[in-house]
Amino acid sequence: MSKILIIEDEGSIADLERDYLERAGYTVLMENNGETGLAAALREDCDLVVLDLMLPGMDGFEVCKKIREEKNIPILIVSARKEDIDKIRGLDLGADDYMTKPFSPSELVARVKAHLARYERLVGSGRTVEENEIVEVRGIRIDKTARRVWVNGEEKSFTNKEFDLLTFLAEHPNHVYTKAELFHEIWKMESVGDIATVTVHIKKIREKIEYNTSNPQYIETIWGVGYRFKI
Ligand code: CA
């Protein structure tokens, strides 16, 4: 269940907010000071912050700004003064919503729900799932994370070194590398082999990605120098 942090110095308001949010099924943390509130927002894995503006320690404007620098969780501001809301709009501190006191607690719950739902949609269900790193060049799609390669939509299999070499070249297009540079880059200190290994690997890569290996469209041979991945 979602965890909500309330930063509010007025005890009766904080209690009211907590009661309604807990009744709606949320886990609630409370802080009554701007500084400790900010620390809790950064430390705790909370999903939404309900923030007062006039706070001891550090005011809500500053707290809002500092949370936003670190996290993209929804921030709902509840302030006694309409002018404060106007000010925070003007300052563009990154708050997601504003309510003026006195407010209806069920309205607060409704807004919290709406913001959490929107945030969930934005970040997706699995927040820890990162997108794969993709390199795409003219019909060649390299998924660096999954180490898979598609050529014009068709998956081709590459050995580890072929994959590393292709990816390196595709990530540095329009740059001529000598065989020695490529050997050093891809094979590193693993072997003290012959740099002709590079030639052999380039040939194998070409067989998989080029339509016509004698007229390569991707990896060009620069005679007497090395190879260049064409943009
Ligand atoms: Ca206050």
Image: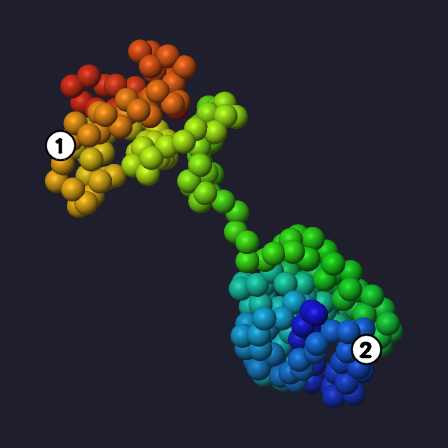
Mark sitting earlier along the chain (1/2): 2
Residue type at mark 2: give it.
Arg
Question: Toward the viewer: 13 or 29?
Answer: 29
Q: Residue furthest bottom?
A: 11
Which of discs 1 and 2 lies nearer the camera? The answer is 1
Q: Quadrant of residue 206?
A: top left
Specify few, some or many for label 1: CA neighbours under 10 Å numbering under 14, 14-19, or 20 or more.
Answer: few
Q: How many numbered marks have been drawn onto this rendered protein structure?
A: 2
In the displayed structure, would residue 35 be above or below residue 95? below
Question: Toward the viewer: 52 or 18?
Answer: 18
State the image coordinates of residue 12 (x, y, percent, origin top left).
78, 87
Labelled pair 1, 2 in contact (Cβ < 8 Å): no
Name the residue carrying label 2: 23
**Gap between marks 1 and 2, in whole Å?**
71 Å
Image quadrant containing the N terminus: bottom right
Would residue 172 be seen by someone viewing this image from the given angle?
A: no
In the displayed structure, would residue 211 be above or below residue 110? above
Question: Toward the viewer: 26 or 10?
Answer: 26
Q: Is residue 151 left or right of residue 200?
A: right
Name the residue carrying label 1: 194
Question: Toward the viewer: 17 or 199?
Answer: 199
Please tell me which residue is depicted at 58% across the width and 68% down the height of the picture. Answer: 67
Q: Quadrant of residue 156?
A: top left
Please tell me which residue is depicted at 44% across the width and 44% down the height of the picture. Answer: 145
Q: Which element type, helix, strand or loop, lies under badge 1?
A: loop
